[in-house]
Structure formats: C-alpha cells, structure tokens
Amino acid sequence: MDPSRFCKIDAHCDIFFVLLMLDKFFGKFSKDLGIDLGTSHTLVYSKEGGIIINEPSIVAVNTRTDQILAVGKDAKDMLGKTPPHISITKPLQKGVISDFEVTEKMLKYFIDKAYTDSFTFAPRPRIVIGVPLETTEVERKAVEDAAISAGARKVYLVENPMLAALGARLPLSESIGMMIVDLGGGTTEIAVMSLAGIVTWKSLDIAGDELNKNIIQYARDMFNLLLGERVAEKVKMRIGSAIPQETPLEIEMRGRDLITGLPREIIVTDTQIREAMDRSIRTIIEQIKATLEKTPPELVADIYERGIVLTGGGALLRGLDVLISRHAEIPVRVAEDPVTSVVRGAGLLLENEELLKDISLPSATEGNII
C-alpha cells in the first residue's frame, strides 16, 4: 500500500484541525451578527449591543459612475426626489436578491457600520441571515456569496418563520403545534411548526408593499390623484386598519391631480383606506385558513389552544389580529415588538450552537471561509 496516501490523509486532518482551532479562536473575539435582510428594512443584531441597525433596504446609485451615493435612511429620504442620473434601488424583491452587486454593497455598509466601534483587528463575523420559505438553492447561494463578499467569516441561513418563532419566544423545539404569520414588506409567510421544523406553510406576494400599492391605486381610481410610495405608506401607518375603529381617523393625502397636473390635497378616512386594502387583507386570511386545512389535526388542536402569533411590520395594522381571529375562529395575538421578531430570533441563535446547526439550511456555497 502506498504510504504517501496516509501522509495526504494526515495532512488533510491537520489542516482541518488548524482551521477548527482558528475558528474557535476567532469566535472569542468576533462580533457575530444576526441579520433580517428584509424587502423593506434591514435589521442587524449583535450579541453585545442588541439591535444596532434598523434601516430601509434602499440604495441610491449614480448611474453615470455606478457609485453608491447613500444607503438606508439617507437613500429613502431621496425617494421620488432624484434627478435622472440617480437611481433609487431596492435590491431585494419579495425577500430575494434581485441585484447582487448592490445587495453586496448594502450588506458591507451595514456590517461596517456594526463594526464602527470595534477594534480594527476584530476578526470577520459569523452571520445568521433570515431567508424566505420559497428560496431556491441559487437564491440562497446569492445571499451567502453577498454576505461573504461583504465580510462574513461564516454564513448560516435560516427560514424567516423559524427565526420569527424564536424571536416571539415560542418553544420551537417542543412537540407542540405553533402557527406563525410573518407579515413583512414583500412577502407574507404562514407556517405551522413543531419539533424545530416546518410542517405546513404558504408564502404570499401580498404584504406591506402590496397594501401601499392598493392605496395608490385607490387614490388614482377614486380621486384622480397620483400618490408617491412614501405618502401611501404614511397614510397606511397613520390611519390604516382592518376593522372599523371606535374613533374615526382621517389624514390629509397629497399628490398630483391627474386631470390638471397640479398638486392637490384631499382628506381621506380610515373607512376609505380600509376599503382600498380590503381585497389583499381578505386574501391573506383565506390563505391562513387554507394552511390550517392542510395541517394535521393534532397540531390544529395545539394551535387552537395556543393561538396564532403575528409577527412582522404588517402585524401592527390596527385590528388585523381581531379580523383573523373572527374568520379562523382561533385566538390570535401580536408578538411583542413584531417588527424585530426575526432579527431577535437570529440573535438568540447565535447563542445556541446546537439549535443553529439543527435548523439552519444546508449551505449552497461549498467551504464558507473561516
């Protein structure tokens, strides 16, 4: 038998052992991060500082030079106010990377910002990132590649509903049926979980951004008024609701008159905005009921007892929990601070190595670097 074969095996074992020791050494000093890479907002969590970044997933690009001009809040402030050579880009569509290069630069900006107060020799971080349920292997690889190119040492991808359940402090590893409805910016994800796994699920394109579009279309159809996206979002947040309110709400809505071409302001009520969003909200409720119909009866019994938990920014829509409860005939509650549930779940995973390895998706990139 060729003795050189054993030398090669020993050499590989030695390299693996050295890399493992280096990873453990770096782990003591690196500022590991949990990231909720959302369609509308990106949130970053560090073990030392909690949620340290919460900014819009928006990038301003100079199309003449391909230079990144602004990221996050600064870029959102430019929305609808830019000259032709400045493009405002949302590099994630429905939770999935649509522009790899811009996403990589955006991630690098947020990672660098998270490390602003760290020593310059701090090792690269391990990063846990939430991804949508319907993500393909190609899309997962794009997220991993973008994070590694932006400075990550190792990347773990976990499905958003799993992180949301952790962030909502649900007993994910127990043999109990739990239902999460994560209402984000680009997608609404409905998942029934038990024993740290997803049993039945549905993913919808109808979420916060779609509700904004509903309001824009309603203003166009009913008032011949063209709204900007930021105005529609403001109206939704200020007076949007799923059920009639005890005290009627109203707000001014400004845009461009489609007939005269001049600026115009009108006053709209919560009833009108509810009418604008009604079809989308009812679609979400029908899909929740359809998911329950596919769920094993033992898990449905648990859900009936424990209730449905709403997470994500859409959970803040007034009365949505009440409306879902009426139609599904199951108790519904909104998680504490639903906007941050996913990123807080990612942060908790950083401190639980065993659960992290158990629920993270298989790597689509061979050899995440140490």
Image (cartoon, rainbow, N blue to C red):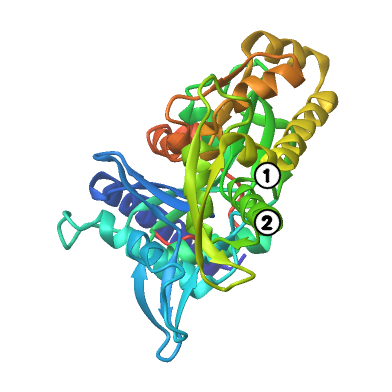
In x, y percent, where is residue 305? 66, 8
Q: Crowding at label 2, few (<14), some or many (≥20) Cα neighbours within 10 Å? A: some
User: Can you see residue 285?
Assistant: yes
In x, y percent, where is residue 169? 47, 22
Alpha carbon of mark 1 to alpha carbon of mark 2: how far?
8 Å
In x, y percent, where is residue 144? 52, 60
Q: In the figure, 168 relative to 281: above or below?
A: above
Numbered tag placed on residue 214 in the rendering? none
Q: Are marks 1 and 2 in contact (CB under 8 Å)?
A: yes
Pick whichever of labels 1 and 2 is earlier in the sequence.
2
Q: In the figure, 199 relative to 253: above or below?
A: above
| Left or right: residue 118 compared with residue 12 | left
Q: In the figure, 48 relative to 261: above or below?
A: above
Assign a secondary structure to mark 1: helix
| The image quarter in which residue 278 lies | top right
Closest to the observer: 330 or 150? 330
- The residue to which callout 2 is attached is 217
Inspect the image, locate mark 2, and give the three-letter code of the amino acid beneath it. Gln
In x, y percent, where is residue 60? 41, 73
| Left or right: residue 76 compared with residue 271 | left
| Left or right: residue 148 compared with residue 24 | right
Residue at figure coordinates x 63%, y 45% from the top left:
207
| The image quarter in which residue 297 lies | top right
Closest to the observer: 107 or 16? 107
Residue at figure coordinates x 51%, y 39% from the top left:
313
- The residue to which callout 1 is attached is 276
